[in-house]
Amino acid sequence: MAAAELKKSLLPPIPSTSSSYSTSANVSSSRRLFFPGMDVIGLKKRGQGLRSWIRVDARTGISQSIELDKFAIMRRCDLPARDIRLLDPLFVYPSTILGRERAIVVNLEQIRCIITADEVLLVNSLDPYVLQYVEELRRHVAANNGQDTASFGGRTALPDYLPFEFRALEAALEAACTSLDSQAEDLQVESYPFLDQLTSTISTKNLELVRRLKSRLVALTRRVQKVRDEIQQLMDDDGDMAEMYLTEKKIRMENSFNDDQPLPVYNSVRPIVSCSAPVTPVSSPPKPRKLDKTMSLAWSKHSISSRSSESSAEKIDELEMLLEAYFVVIDDTLNKLTSLKEYIDDTEDFINIQLDSVQNQLIQFELRLTTVTFITAIFGVVAGIFGMNFEVPLFEEPFAFLWVLVTTGACGLLIFLGFFCYFRYRRLMPM
């Protein structure tokens, strides 16, 4: 049902009136001149359609469902379109954590959200890990409010206090690591019995099951490795971690704007009006004044951002410790998958050894059979010689047949022993 509603919200509206039909006909006829067979306006509307989001407030922890389009999200969070594209459920992107000026873009498995200092905008989904993330985030906000209340009551706050954006990021990392770890454990529980059974009974069915398990293992390992690399990349870059202090940057920005005063040149110098010039009822500041104000505002914003980054870079220990904790968790999950992969490789090596042993046994049996066939052919040669139509005095002897049979058998036995000793000498057969 949710997928159908999402698809319906993304599709462009269908006109129903005759006027809209004529307008769309004119537009489509003009469109066919340049792009035959392609509905360009429909594609643009589909990319700009409303999408359902779950908003979690940073102060109260209340979650609500809202509908916003792409441009509204871009203006609201000050993000480029390429960052919003990472959260699109229609596309498949690897796990990514991006720190921007006013937001943190998180794409970790099922968790696709935008974290700001005031709220979290989460792509609406019925996935249990998404719902678990919302509940965990509400619990973090409630715990934070409890700490604030305790501090107002005369007690000191707990030393492990984190800003809202870090609590939201921690909840996202926890949900992603829990999901990957549970999938790794399920794969381990499912794989080991099949691998043990395969070592005792080699069959096509067991080999097919192991092949599917190995494909799942490779895909899961790639996802876990991507999350681990993303966390490690953040830990290695102090600038990226400093960009994620959104609450501190917001406080500095508000304080700077509150402390900003108008430039003294505009307060002390009054505009000079000529006596001959006509006086307008409403005077407007000249264009250079507007330009100076804009440049001053932009420069103050840039200086605030740079000072915030420099100050945050000096105290990024709390974020680094947070990332390090989940780096250990995801690294342990990767070690589980690595050990499972090594077990599968060892099982494959064992199976190959068994198959090679069986093949060697078949070769040895074929070698013995070939030798026996050669010896048996000697009896055929002797029988062919004595079966010719000529007179031989040996035929008159009463025990001639017995002597020929014994002599041929002895010669064949000697030849067989000679071949056997030669094969042992060349190590073609086991000792």
Image (spheres, rainbow, N blue to C red):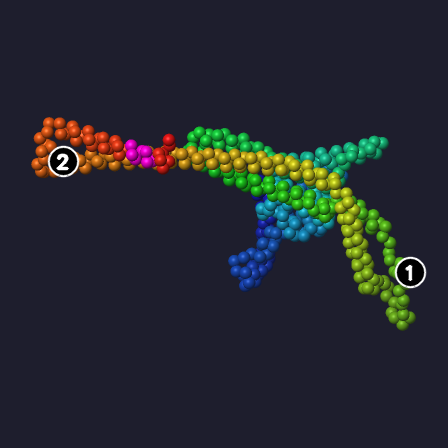
Going by the numbered disc 1, the residue's amino acid type is Ser
Q: Residue at x 71, y 34 (%)?
A: 139
For the stretch drawn in magenta, the main secondary structure is helix
Q: Which mark is residue 114?
A: none
Mark 2 secondary-structure assignment: helix
Q: Image height check: is 276 above or below 172?
A: below
Q: Residue 195 location in percent, x, y?
A: 48, 32
- Residue under the image location 83 percent in, 31 percent down: 155
**Location of residue 53 by image quarter:** top right
Report the quarter where the C terminus lies: top left
Q: Residue at x 46, y 34 (%)?
A: 350
Name the front one of labels 1 and 2. Answer: 2
Please check the rendered image and state whether residue 185 is part of the magenta-colored stretch, yes or no.
Answer: no
**Residue 218 appears in the figure:** yes
347 or 31: nearer the viewer:
347
Residue beneath label 2, please?
A: 386
* Residue 97 visible in the displayed image: no
Query: Of the numbered discs in the image, which one, if any, rests on residue 268?
Result: 1
Amino acid beneath label 2: Phe
Q: CA distance from mark 1 to mark 2?
A: 140 Å
For mark 1, give the secondary structure: helix
- Where does residue 18 sit, x and y in percent of width and height? 58, 56
**What range is drawn magenta here?**
417-423
